[in-house]
Image (cartoon, rainbow, N blue to C red):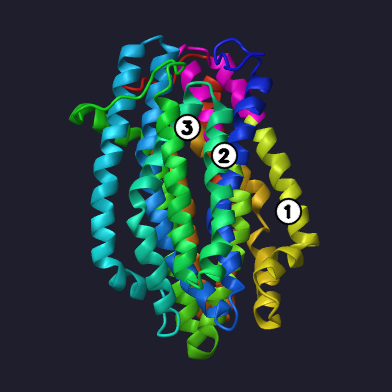
């Protein structure tokens, strides 16, 4: 049985399925890290709703920390795949080793910075007097495990880039299963509450990290992992490519911060925490859509980059098409599920009518434009894989800017909960803008009329 994939010769539709679907599943499983924590926390007797709001306040920090793994993971793996496509294993090995070295340095620095500043950050992010103790307990422990989270997330991209998507999927599966098993043990059996959820997550991330590093050191890897003294020029090239997906994820933190702050401010002491609790549930549901979709588009990036390095525009065009079809089908199914059965998801978190009804309404609002959003994801990640980070970053920041502005402005004219409409507004408008720009600027390349430019290595 064939265990590796030939990015230059295998059928494109088959490759997209073999690479993107496992990566999609891996991202879906990875979502369980945060969702399972929130499910168990929301079901803590008496304090569950307040504790869930506290964990929701931590979401921007968790997202921001994860984005640094993406900075060096996607940035390095795109350059790595281009070099493999050009049959330049020497430079591929250099890129892999430098990505690893930089991840070690950055993860240690971030751990120190966030532990020192977490109190101020949580207050800025919408924590109230009631929810701050829960947010502080969760954040302190989670931040301490930043080293393992970033290394595991960042280096896992290189497993898929070398033609082993199932091993990449296994990484997140290991972590998610361990987290699911340990959560009830630490939260309920050891009576650690929110702190127990954070401990379970960190232990799961440690196991995932160990698996990734051991896998990359195996002899069957075309380019095995090594560590080197960081090279400044290589680091700049990695950051240049990875900055777009990094900023896309990092800006998600700003959006969550803005939403929590707006809900707390306009909701007031009586309704603010209720709105944040509902928003936390809704955002958890959205992760079930956006994370697998990111898995589809992110999983296809090594395939696009490899064929870019091999100068095969015909295969790149086919990859764009089949990835888009897969994303559209997935989001269409999730749109229907969001209309028919959001109650089943919400009830996992809470049975309290005040929170449940608001969360169900929020899910239906947030998912109004998820099908057009698939165009945005495919275009942005595809252009990143081609090294066109300025364009992809501009398109992504356009969406984030629309989202941020709408979040802040809509409640000025309507109610606090109307801020939820910022999501579909930004998704719909940005998808139209991205599609028009992509078609008119890159139509020649899509027809196979030459290369778009060079990724400097």
- In this view, 235 is above or below 45: above
- Residue 146 position in % (x across, y down): 35, 52
Answer whether residue 300 is visible to the viewer in this image: yes
User: Marks 2 and 1: which is nearer the front?
Assistant: 2
Q: Position of residue 436 (x, y in %)?
A: 56, 39
Question: Which image quadrant: the C terminus?
Answer: top left
Residue underneath mark 3: 383
Q: Is residue 27 magenta?
A: no
Residue of label 2: 295
Task: Give the labeled residue for mark 1.
Answer: 335
- Residue farthest front in this picture: 189
- Residue toward you, 102 or 173: 173
Q: Is residue 305 magenta?
A: yes
Looking at the rendering, the stretch of residues picked out in magenta corresponds to 297-322
**Closer to the N terminus: mark 2 or mark 3?**
2
Q: Is residue 80 left or right of residue 52?
A: left
Is residue 13 toward the left or the right of residue 274 in the image?
right
Residue 136, image x, y percentages: 37, 72
């Amino acid at each position: 049985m064939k265990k590796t994939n030939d990015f230059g010769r295998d059928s494109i539709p088959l490759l997209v399925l073999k690479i993107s679907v496992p990566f999609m599943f891996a991202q879906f499983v990875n979502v369980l890290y945060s969702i399972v924590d929130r499910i168990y926390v929301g079901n803590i007797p008496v304090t569950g709703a307040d504790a869930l709001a506290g964990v929701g306040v931590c979401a921007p920090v968790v997202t921001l920390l994860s984005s640094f793994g993406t900075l060096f993971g996607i940035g390095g793996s795109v350059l790595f795949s281009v070099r493999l496509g050009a049959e330049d294993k020497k430079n591929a090995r250099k890129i892999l080793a430098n990505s690893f070295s930089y991840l070690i340095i950055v993860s240690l620095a971030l751990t120190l910075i966030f532990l020192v500043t977490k109190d101020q950050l949580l207050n800025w992010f919408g924590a109230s007097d009631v929810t701050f103790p829960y947010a502080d307990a969760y954040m302190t422990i989670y931040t301490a495990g930043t080293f393992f989270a970033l290394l595991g997330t960042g280096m896992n991209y290189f497993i898929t880039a070398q033609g082993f998507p199932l091993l990449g999927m296994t990484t997140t599966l290991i972590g998610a299963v361990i987290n699911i098993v340990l959560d009830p043990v630490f939260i309920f059996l050891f009576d650690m509450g929110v702190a127990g959820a954070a401990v379970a997550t960190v232990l799961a991330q440690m196991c995932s990290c160990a698996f990734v590093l051991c896998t990359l050191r195996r002899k069957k890897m075309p380019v095995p992992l090594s560590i080197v003294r960081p090279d400044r020029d290589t680091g700049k090239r990695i950051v240049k490519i990875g900055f777009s997906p990094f900023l896309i994820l990092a800006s998600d933190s700003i959006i969550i911060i803005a939403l929590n702050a707006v809900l707390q401010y306009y909701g007031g002491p009586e309704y603010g925490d209720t709105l944040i609790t509902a928003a936390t549930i809704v955002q958890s549901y959205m992760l079930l859509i956006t994370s697998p979709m990111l898995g589809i588009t992110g999983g296809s990036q090594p395939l696009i980059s490899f064929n870019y390095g091999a100068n095969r525009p015909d295969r790149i065009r086919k990859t764009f098409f089949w990835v888009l079809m897969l994303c559209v089908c997935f989001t269409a199914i999730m749109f229907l599920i969001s209309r028919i059965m959001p109650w089943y998801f919400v009830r996992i978190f809470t049975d309290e009518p005040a929170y449940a009804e608001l969360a169900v309404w929020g899910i239906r609002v947030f998912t109004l434009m998820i099908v057009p959003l698939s165009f945005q994801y495919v275009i942005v990640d595809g252009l990143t894989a081609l090294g066109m980070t300025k364009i992809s970053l501009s398109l992504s920041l356009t969406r984030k800017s629309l989202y941020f502005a709408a979040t802040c402005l809509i409640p000025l004219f309507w109610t606090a909960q109307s801020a939820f409409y910022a999501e579909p507004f930004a998704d719909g408008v940005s998808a139209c803008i991205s599609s028009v720009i992509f078609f008119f600027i890159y139509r020649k390349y899509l027809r196979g009329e030459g290369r778009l430019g060079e990724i400097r290595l």
